[in-house]
Image (tube, rainbow, N blue to C red):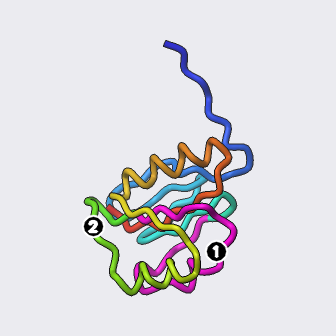
Amino acid sequence: MQLNEIDYGRARPIEGYGPGFFRIGGEVITGPALITADRAQAWGGYDDTAALLPLAGQIDVLFIGTGAEMAYLPPAFRTTLDTAGIGVEPMASAAACRTYNVLLSEGRRVAAALLPV
């Protein structure tokens, strides 16, 4: 089996996560996190759509990590993002981290808003 080193270029991959934290590009963020190719920051959770709306037109999809298990998104949260033209894909946070990294390595325009496990 051949293993290849993934080159993210200047993008910031999700390197790890654990109870209550995410490690992105060598930086640790406690609590919910918003990650794009060029930045990582704390996120206020489902009540903080203001941090997500500027992503409209800059990304093709926003992965929403719903915590330890897959959960439905609050209807008002989803409607706000749909109205802004931001495509969302909810999934458990672990799956969102993996999917974000794979698509980021392909040079895709993705972001992740993650609730901790």
Position of 72 compared to 90: left or right? Answer: left
Q: Which residues are magenta?
A: 40-64
Closer to us: 67 or 77: 77
Side of 93 relative to 80 (left or right): left
For residue 74, side relative to residue 107 (left or right): left
Q: Amino acid at mark 2?
A: Ala
51 falls in the magenta region: yes
**Type of amino acid under label 1:** Ala
Nearest to the observer: residue 10 or residue 72: 72
Task: Measuring from the top left, give residue 39's x and y in whole percent.
Answer: 65, 64
Q: Residues within 10 Å of mark 2 (few under 14, many from 20)?
A: few
**Residue 85: x percent and y percent?**
58, 75
- Pointer 1 residue: 56
- Tell me which numbered mark, 2 or 1, is placed earlier along the sequence: 1
Residue in front for this viewpoint, 53 or 16: 53
- Name the residue rendered at 57%, 71% in the picture: 41
